[in-house]
Image (tube, rainbow, N blue to C red):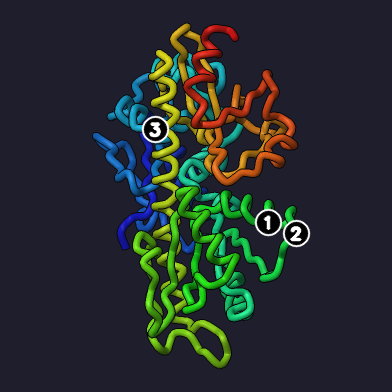
């Protein structure tokens, strides 16, 4: 199987550091049935690291006196997340190259290999809480099958949203439903013949497309697909892979579905990060600033035309306030998010939208915000 994710080690890592990092990564990936060096590509001190844009990718850079930079500058320009690591905090000015001087780093003496592994996995969307899937299906037809699928995917460490109510009209519920959809990487669509005839499934599909969320269509045997699903990824069930009497998937179908979902989800995460980063970069450069790169936690490092430096966490799901969370990494100055699909009432109640000390910036208004910021408005 071709690699779905790409990780690389640059700089001046010791053998002990590489060993500790590999051990931590392998242990974490076991929960997802992924293997380091197989589904998760792994390169150590390559002459050049050239990941494909459809593969979530990240780099850990171990600082040192003779650290090999490889094509670090190009990776920063591309927006590939880079996690700097120093032996001790006081050595950061000596061990890190100027390109990474503004970046938050991991203090290896304090945090160790485990924290480096977590930062790398977070950068490619491979923490359990990041693997979000929205299961879209005709409730009254497939409730039992959807529940079983929920259990299987949860065991593979996907965070699956499963709604059982086909008659929900409560406004608060509908807001919650759309927010959960906005937070997902993939809409997993069980495309039975009546899928587009139902109110909720029809709306879920349309909103996923509007938000730029990837769709994995599970095609039902002997059913005709709608022209609306032409851009969706497909897993076609054969005639014997769904038991119409027991309303359950056969094991072969479940295994194929899990593998396909992993593939679609990885590509979706990569594309969403590339697109979001590009929007932020364009906004920064249009206001006369410089986009310096992306660190861990999807942190964008920005230098305004005035010379002032900012770091802003990029969120392409539902934004939350992480400022009070304990972290080995320093806090951000702002949060940039995509407002599409998020209800205005919820945003106004979120608490920090108009907080000048920690602004929440709509990505489509980022250029204006950066212009105001450098002018001191």
**For discs 3 and 1, the disc positioned in front in the rendered view:** 1
What is the distance, in whole Å, between disc 1 and disc 2 at their CAs?
Answer: 6 Å
Q: Is residue 359 above or below residue 135?
A: above
Judge by depth and name the residue closer to the eye, 345 or 218: 345
- Number of residues whose C-alpha sits closer than 10 Å to that of mark 1, classed few (under 14), some (14–19) or many (20 or more): few
Q: Quadrant of residue 280?
A: top left
Q: Position of residue 47 (x, y in %)?
A: 24, 34
* Tags 1 and 2 touching, CB below 8 Å: yes
What is the distance, in whole Å, between disc 3 and disc 2 at their CAs?
Answer: 37 Å
User: Residue at horizontal 60%, vertical 70%?
Assistant: 150
Q: Position of residue 308 (x, y in %)?
A: 51, 10
What is the distance, in whole Å, between disc 3 and disc 1 at their CAs?
Answer: 31 Å
Compared across the picture, whether 360 is left or right of 20 comes to right
Q: Which residue is mark 1?
A: 174
Farthest left residue in view: 47
- Number of residues whose C-alpha sits closer than 10 Å to that of mark 2, classed few (under 14), some (14–19) or many (20 or more): few
Compared across the picture, whether 278 is left or right of 134 comes to left
Judge by depth and name the residue closer to the eye, 176 or 75: 176
Farthest bottom residue in view: 245
Residue 104 visible somewhere in the drawing: yes
Q: Which residue is mark 2?
A: 170
* Tags 3 and 2 touching, CB below 8 Å: no
User: Residue at horizontal 41%, vertical 73%?
Assistant: 256
User: Residue at horizontal 34%, vertical 48%?
Assistant: 54
Q: Which residue is mark 3?
A: 278
* Picture quarter with the C terminus: top right
Q: Position of residue 26 (x, y in %)?
A: 47, 54
SS category of the residue bearing label 3: helix
Q: Which mark is residue 253?
A: none
SS category of the residue bearing label 2: loop
| First along the sequence among labels 3 and 1 | 1
């Amino acid at each position: 199987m071709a690699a779905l994710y790409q990780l690389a080690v640059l700089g001046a890592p010791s053998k002990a550091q590489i060993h500790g990092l590999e051990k931590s990564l392998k242990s974490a990936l076991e929960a997802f049935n992924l293997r380091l060096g197989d589904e998760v590509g792994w390169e150590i001190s390559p002459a050049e690291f050239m990941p494909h844009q459809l593969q979530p990718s990240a780099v850990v850079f171990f600082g040192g006196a003779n650290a090999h930079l490889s094509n670090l500058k190009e990776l920063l320009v591309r927006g590939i997340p880079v996690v700097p690591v120093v032996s001790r905090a006081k050595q950061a000015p000596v061990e890190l190259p100027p390109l990474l001087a503004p970046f938050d780093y991991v203090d290896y003496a304090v945090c160790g290999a485990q924290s480096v592994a977590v930062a790398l996995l977070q950068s490619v969307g491979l923490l359990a809480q990041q693997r979000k899937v929205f299961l879209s299906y005709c409730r009254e037809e497939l409730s039992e099958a959807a529940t079983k699928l929920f259990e299987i995917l949860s065991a593979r460490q996907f965070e699956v949203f499963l709604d059982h109510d086909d008659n929900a009209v409560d406004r608060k519920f509908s807001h919650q439903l759309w927010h959960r959809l906005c937070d997902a990487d993939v809409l997993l669509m069980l495309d039975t013949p009546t899928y587009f005839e139902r109110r909720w499934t029809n709306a879920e599909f349309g909103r996923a497309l509007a938000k730029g969320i990837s769709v994995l269509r599970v095609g039902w045997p002997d059913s005709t697909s709608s022209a609306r699903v032409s851009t969706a990824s497909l897993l076609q069930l054969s005639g014997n892979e769904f038991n119409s009497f027991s309303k359950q998937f056969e094991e072969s179908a479940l295994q194929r579905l899990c593998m396909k979902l992993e593939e679609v989800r990885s590509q979706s995460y990569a594309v969403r990060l590339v697109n979001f980063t590009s929007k932020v970069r364009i906004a920064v450069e249009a206001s006369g600033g410089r986009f310096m790169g992306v660190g861990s936690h999807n942190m964008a490092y920005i230098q305004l035309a005035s010379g002032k430096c900012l770091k802003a966490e990029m969120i392409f799901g539902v934004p939350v306030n992480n400022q009070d969370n304990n972290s080995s990494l320093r806090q951000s100055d702002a949060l940039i998010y995509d407002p599409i699909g998020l209800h205005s009432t919820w945003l106004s109640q979120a608490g920090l939208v108009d907080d000048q000390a920690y602004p929440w910036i709509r990505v489509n208004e980022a250029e204006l915000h950066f212009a105001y910021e450098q002018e001191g408005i």
